[in-house]
Image (cartoon, rainbow, N blue to C red):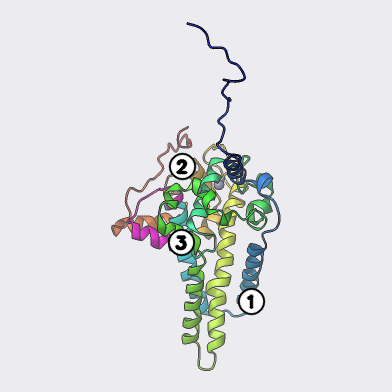
Amino acid sequence: MTPTTITPQNAKPATKSYATPAVAEVVQKVKQDLRMGRAHQQGRINWITTIAMGLFHVGAIAALFCFSWKNLAAFAIMYFFAINVGIGMAYHRLLTHRGYKTPKWVEYFVSFCGTLALEGGPIFWVATHRVHHQNSDQEGDPHTPHDGTWWAHAGWILSGRALHSETALLGRYAPDLTRDPVHVWLSKYHYASIVLTGVLQLVIGAALASPGHAVYGAVSMLLWGTFLRVTVGLHATWLVNSATHLWGKRRFETKDDSRNNWWVALLTGGEGWHNNHHAHPVSARHGLAWYEFDPNYYGIWFLSKIGLAEKIQVAQYDKENPKPAGA
Ligand SMILES: [Zn+2]
Ligand SMILES: [Zn+2]
């Protein structure tokens, strides 16, 4: 048998080549745009997001001048649906980590609640959070305090390169959601729920106001139920990215800097037990000791009791020698 001689004419390239330069360019762009973390994402200020955030903060401060028990009730009800049901139970524990299962209509309803938090649609949120788990506190983490505390808290939202709009790119991290037209729709029109519930608050606020004060009643309920509520909810969620990677106790020796932080857990319905979560990401239960208050898990437990949730994953670990899952 004659050995084949490799000549420049029959040599095959060591790396895969693409049919046209245009395809290669697109592939390269996708690879670059998906590199999260400050080194790759810091860029121009994202003005639309920054102006929207500024307006919500102004509205939040204005709300403090028109307190009423009715307005506080609007705040509490909306906060519960947006942050507990929407972000904790739906976006995080159900959609990102699939820690339990629900009928599709329940999944869609709780995901709709997630859009109330003004944290983007399900595809953006889930993809970003999966990248966070993949690269926690390493290069490529979208929001690690290693890149600065402010960057981890809000800087990555205000001056990142607006990955929100890059649904097609982010879809690589959430193919389960991009295949589902309802999640695609919720992601595209994620602001619709805020407009809808805002109008409802105006109507209810006017209806409940004393005679002659309809406009004040309407506007003040909107300020509490939407502007102050969204602003507090955003900071509570952002604290999971900043504070729980900086301050608190570590039960598990995970590869990242995650911590269990009781006050972030109180603000977020249990998401502050973040070291437990990084050690056992699929567990629908984040508070693993009886004293670790975890209302979002109690919500999932309640759903299972009325037949709307099943296959709930709960972390099992040795209390004497706690180890992360798979260690
Ligand atoms: Zn984390
Ligand atoms: Zn997570």
Q: Along the horizontal axis of the image, is 98 left or right of 170?
A: left
Q: Residue furthest right?
A: 44
Q: Which residues are magenta?
A: 95-113
The yes-or-no answer for disc 2 within 8 Å of ligand 2 is no
Residue 287: x %, y % from top left: 46, 50
Quick one: label 2 or label 1, which is nearer the N terminus? 1
Residue 271 seen in the current view: no
Q: Is residue 107 magenta?
A: yes
Residue 275: x %, y % from top left: 53, 44
Of tags 2 and 3, which is closer to the observer?
Answer: 3
Residue 233: x %, y % from top left: 55, 63
For disc 1, the marked residue is 62
Tag 1: amino acid: Ala
Name the chief secondary structure element in magenta.
Answer: helix
Tag 2: amino acid: His
Give the numbered dot on residue 280. Answer: 2
For disc 3, the marked residue is 186
Number of callouts: 3
